[in-house]
Image (spheres, helix red, strand yellow):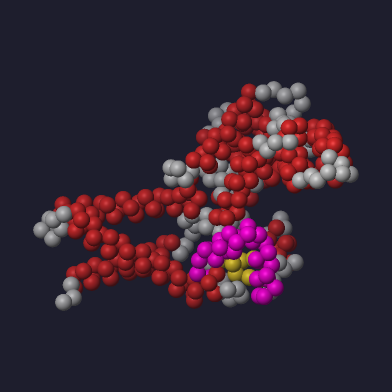
């Protein structure tokens, strides 16, 4: 015999999931809200269990019975939500006119799995372009474009394109690199304009690197490690006012090891950004991440107490920060984010420019 009440409740839960996707989740960005949504959903489930026991004790005399009913309703709700997402992405999404594997339409698991193969996603994407052409759909809302005209269309000053959700990767920090607002980027970019007198500071590290290469002349040498030592020592001087001593000692520093691991994780999950807030908020899973950012914070605090003989890159950023009468908590986070930017993106630019002028 069919329980009509149960059938109606499950149907209502299913269509509630469908409606939530169509009228809410289908619009806007929800990556940063992932943790709050998950916590809210779990809280609602447990509140439903307690409510059933309290308000309908005759039908739900124990928490186990109520939990079974609440779990069933939650399952149908999730089923409706997921089914609605898959149908919309597979057959009605506005990006469906672009070519690509059908499975790529359905979930960002597809590019994530490609990335996890060998951490050489660019090779996998190149093969897709060879098969499908200049435009390839990599995910539900993601395209890979190699058409020459895309450079101007996307990156020119007159472009109407804006940075995507990936640039929330450091949230709640907002570094110069991850600012998504063009007017805000222009305002903060001005602080970086004087940052050009760094070459004399870098010269001694170039000399150290050349000396290390000369010492190992005729012997096997892991040049990848030594060029990393060089760039990280340069970065340490420019960002934090001190070298990490890797060129002198030939030993990998904690920051270099942790940063490479951090960047590998970012690369792996960059197509499923909604997982990052959950990882950051989950004990044990976030232990290494918390340790890494504590270290970065400590370097920034130590640098703020220093008065270097010659201004480094961080000097101008710190001067602008301290010019604020009352820096907000967000201003403090952004300063740390800019220090991170110098450490990661800056080291590549400074190294490239220095070697161009040296050789």
Name above or below for residue 343 compared with residue 275: above
Considering every residue shown, the one lying at the far left of the view is 58
Task: Give 157 or 309, whichever is nearer the viewer.
Answer: 309
Give the residue at x 66% y 36%: 253
- Does 111 lie within the magenta span? yes
Q: Is residue 10 left or right of residue 118?
A: left
x and y percent of residue 349 in the render? 75, 45
Main SS, magenta residues: helix
x and y percent of residue 181 in the render? 60, 50
x and y percent of residue 26 in the render? 46, 64
Report which quarter residue 333 is drawn in.
Answer: top right
Residues shaded magenta: 105-132
Q: Is residue 76 left or right of residue 226?
A: left
Task: Give 211 or 127, whichever is nearer the viewer.
Answer: 211
Give the residue at x 70% y 58%: 155
- Does 230 lie within the magenta span? no
x and y percent of residue 80 in the render? 36, 68
Report which quarter residue 271 is drawn in.
Answer: bottom right
């Amino acid at each position: 015999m069919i329980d009509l009440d149960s059938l109606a409740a499950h149907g209502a839960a299913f269509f509630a999931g469908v409606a939530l996707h169509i009228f809410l989740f289908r619009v806007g960005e929800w990556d940063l809200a992932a943790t709050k949504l998950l916590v809210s959903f779990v809280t609602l489930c447990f509140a439903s269990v307690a409510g059933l026991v309290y308000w309908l004790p005759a039908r739900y005399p124990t928490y186990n019975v109520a939990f079974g009913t609440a779990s069933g309703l939650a399952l149908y709700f999730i089923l409706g939500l997921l089914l609605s997402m898959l149908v919309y992405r597979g057959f009605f999404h506005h990006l469906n006119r672009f070519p690509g594997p059908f499975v790529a339409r359905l979930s960002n698991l597809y590019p994530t799995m490609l990335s996890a193969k060998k951490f050489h996603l660019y090779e996998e994407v190149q093969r897709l372009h060879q098969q499908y052409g200049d435009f390839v759909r990599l995910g539900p809302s993601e395209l890979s474009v190699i058409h020459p005209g895309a450079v101007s269309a996307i990156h020119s000053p007159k472009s109407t394109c804006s940075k995507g959700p990936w640039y929330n990767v450091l949230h709640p920090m907002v570094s110069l690199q991850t600012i998504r607002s063009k007017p805000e980027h222009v305002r903060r970019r001005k602080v970086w304009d004087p940052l050009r007198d760094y070459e004399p500071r870098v010269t001694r590290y170039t000399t150290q690197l050349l000396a290390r290469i000369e010492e190992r002349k005729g012997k096997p040498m892991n040049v990848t490690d030594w060029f990393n030592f060089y760039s990280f020592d340069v970065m340490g001087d420019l960002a934090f006012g001190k070298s990490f001593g890797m060129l002198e000692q030939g030993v990998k520093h904690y920051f270099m090891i942790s940063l490479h691991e951090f960047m590998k994780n970012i690369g792996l999950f960059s197509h499923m950004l909604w997982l990052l807030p959950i990882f950051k908020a989950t004990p044990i899973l976030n232990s290494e991440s918390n340790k890494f950012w504590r270290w970065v914070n400590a370097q920034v605090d130590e640098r703020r107490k220093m008065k270097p003989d010659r201004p480094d890159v961080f000097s101008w950023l710190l001067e602008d920060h301290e010019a604020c009468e009352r820096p907000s908590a967000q201003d403090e986070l952004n300063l740390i984010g800019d220090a991170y930017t110098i450490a990661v993106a800056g080291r590549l630019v400074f190294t490239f420019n220095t070697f161009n002028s040296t050789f």
